[in-house]
Image (tube, rainbow, N blue to C red):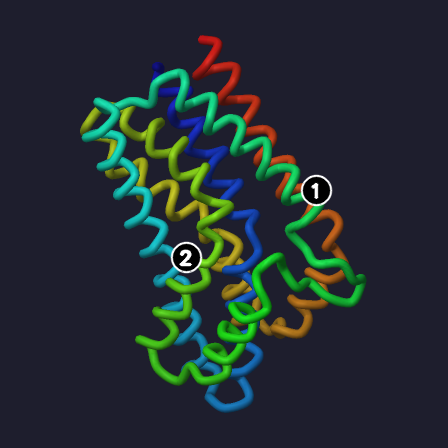
Amino acid sequence: MSDIVCVATILLAGLAQASLQLGLGGLILLYHNSLGRHRRRRTSYLARNYILGTGAITFLVVAAFCFLIGNFFNGALTTEWLVIALGALGACAIVMWLLYYRRGKGSTELWLPKSITRFIRKKARQTNDGVEAFSLGLLSSFAEMPISIALFFVVANAILNLSSAWQVLGVVAYTLISIIPMVILQFRIQAGRTAVEAQQWRLKNKAFLKIISGSSFLTLALFVAAFWIMK
């Protein structure tokens, strides 16, 4: 497989990962609860650690999938497994459009069980140091694993098709793309915006975000079908 196709796959998968909302929602919760108890510099420090946590779990999971495919699939997914990944991506697109957000115009609450949602909110309220913020970022990314697992299979397969000198860079690039929305949010809040304004924007544009998320998964699925399965 050409490097261009592999890089495009990493980019599309990274954008699909970035469109998921739990990590961003957790960061907004952290800002909202922390700014009332800490100085702005302290809150920014906690936010950076939160983003590092989400990036760390993404990097480690993608690396683990690379190891899995490298050792159990001889370095590349077979056509049968790619078809399974394609079906999973298509299913994820439908889930994003229909089930990802709970019903209700006044809320951006996601599909997660209520117990997990309450736990994340509780942890966001209790976060006071960098380690707790880092672990909250880990938890937020890990909680969306049922949706992102198909992305990890596809992107790990693409990374392993790169030359060995570029594989680590591929994992890093995917990780950086996946955290872009959180980095942008942090910069905007440091520039004077508030967490409330960010949440209001998410609420106002929920339908748009839903379309973008589902479309990003579908686009990746079509790309996999065109360039990996029917090559």
The answer to which quarter of the image holds residue 177 is top left
In the rendered image, which quarter contains the C terminus?
A: top left
Residue in view at x 69 percent, y 43 percent: 97
Q: Which structural element holds mark 2?
A: helix
Q: Which structural element holds mark 1?
A: helix
In the rendered image, which quarter contains the N terminus?
A: top left
Considering every residue shown, the one lying at the far right of the view is 105
Query: Amino acid type of disc 1?
Result: Ile
Considering every residue shown, the one lying at the far bottom of the view is 37
Query: Amino acid type of disc 2?
Result: Phe
User: Mark 2–mark 1 contact, CB under 8 Å?
Assistant: no
Q: Residue 142 carries which label?
A: 2
Name the residue beneath numbered marker 1.
Answer: 211
Residue 30, image x, y percentages: 51, 75
Residue in view at x 55 percent, y 75 percent: 118
The answer to which quarter of the image holds residue 205 is bottom right
Q: Is residue 71 above or below residue 92?
A: above
Q: In this view, does 221 lie above or below 110?
A: above
Q: How crowded is mark 1: few (under 14 residues within 10 Å), some or many (20 or more)?
A: some
Asked if residue 171 lies left or right of residue 199, the reply is: left
Q: Of marks 2 and 1, which one's residue comes earlier in the chain?
A: 2
Camera-side residue: 176 or 188?
Answer: 176
Q: Which is closer to the viewer, label 2 or label 1?
A: 2
Q: Which mark is residue 16?
A: none
Asked if residue 182 lies left or right of residue 80, the reply is: right
Asked if residue 212 lies left or right of residue 112, the reply is: right
Residue 211, image x, y percentages: 70, 42
Q: Is residue 98 above or below residue 73?
A: below
Calculate the distance from the C-alpha at mark 2 to the C-alpha at mark 1.
23 Å
Residue 33, image x, y percentages: 54, 82
